[in-house]
Amino acid sequence: MSEMLELADKMFTALSRGDIAVLDEIYHADVKIWHNWDNAEQSREDNLRILSGIPTRYDDFGYDEARCTALEDGFVRQHVIRATIGDKTVNVPTIFRVFVDGGKVRRIEEYLDAGELRKVFA
């Protein structure tokens, strides 16, 4: 199970740094990313494109209060997204359910209140 926690750490370290090369390495070729706020699956290419823009969209972005639980087929990660633009900061509780196959991320299910995150854009 420690390999699941190592993969989770690698994934979220890369996300917080905007290191798309690492995500490209750990994502399965046909990974799907589902979001609760739009009930849609995102392709690997769309997800990497959007994630690559995080450093340019926010003045500060990170994950606080992280808690991760390894599972036989992946992991569950809870954290609070902290995003700042100018003088506006939001803290959004989030849960990721990540499914892993062959050491690579096969599916991500992300649960958060996107309305909270949009407050920094208003």
Image (cartoon, rainbow, N blue to C red):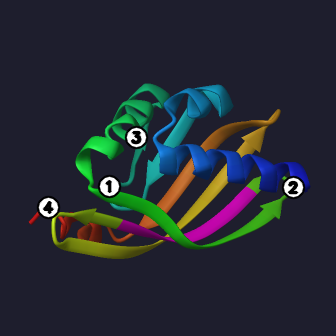
Instruction: Work out whether mark 1 precedes mark 4 in sequence or the reverse, and give the earlier one.
Output: 1
Give the labeled residue for mark 3.
51
Give the labeled residue for mark 4.
121
Assign a secondary structure to mark 3.
helix
Assign a secondary structure to mark 1.
loop
- Position of residue 56 relative to residue 35, above or below, is above
Give the labeled residue for mark 2.
72
Assign a secondary structure to mark 4.
loop
Q: CA distance from mark 1 to mark 3?
A: 17 Å
Give the foreground label among 2 and 4: 4
Give the labeled residue for mark 1.
38
Q: Is residue 76 left or right of residue 90?
A: right
| Residue type, mark 2 in image | Glu
Q: Is residue 90 left or right of residue 24?
A: left
Q: Is residue 95 visible?
A: yes
Instruction: Work out whether mark 2 precedes mark 4 in sequence or the reverse, and give the earlier one.
Output: 2
Tag 1: Cα neighbours inside 10 Å, few (<14), some, or many (≥20)? few
